[in-house]
Amino acid sequence: MYEKNALDTARLIAAAQANSADARMWRWYADAMEERRLRCQWKDRYWVVTLDGRNISSDQSFDSALRAAQIMDSALVGLQRA
């Protein structure tokens, strides 16, 4: 019985973390689009994501391309601060 409760708790925590990460990613997307910093283009069966005039990710999945772009943007911001 305890193992089932622990597994259910772990699943709930994982779901909450995924929802939080998803919300942050879509907020980043909305902000970048509003600021006209982001462009998403379907090209040769891939989504190409351009941020501030620089191609920063591409993937066949729109969702994966955006998530990779957000990660790359965070990394670039971190490098600029260092």
Image (spheres, rainbow, N blue to C red):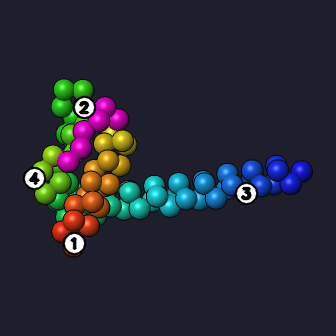
**Which one is closest to the eye, mark 3 or mark 2?**
3
Image side of residue 65 versus residue 7, left or right: left
Relative vertical location of residue 67 with respect to residue 76 in this rendering, above or below: above
- Name the residue type under label 4: Gly
Q: Which residue is mark 4?
A: 53
Residue type beneath disc 3: Thr
Does the magenta stretch mainly form a helix, a strand or a loop?
A: strand
The residue at the far top in this view is 44
- The furthest residue to the bottom: 81
**Cα separation between marks 4 and 1:** 22 Å
Mark 4 and mark 2 lie on one chain; the one further toward the N terminus is 2
Q: Earlier in the sequence, mark 1 or mark 2?
A: 2
Q: Of helix, strand and loop, which one carries label 4?
A: loop
Q: Residue furthest left?
A: 53
Q: Which residues are magenta?
A: 56-61
Amino acid type, mark 2: Tyr
Which residue is pictured at 36% across the width and 41% down the height? 64
Q: Earlier in the sequence, mark 3 or mark 4?
A: 3
Q: CA distance from mark 1 to mark 2?
A: 32 Å
Q: CA distance from mark 1 to mark 3?
A: 38 Å
Q: Is residue 35 above or below residue 66?
A: below
Residue annotated with mark 3: 9
The numbered dot on residue 82 is: 1
Q: Amino acid at mark 1?
A: Ala
Q: Are marks 1 and 3 in contact (CB under 8 Å)?
A: no
Q: Does dot 3 land on a helix, a strand or a loop? A: helix
Is residue 2 found inside the magenta-colored segment of the image?
no
The residue mark sitting in front, 1 or 2, is 1
Q: Relative to the observer, which residue lies in front, 47 or 4?
A: 4
Quadrant assignment, res 41 = top left
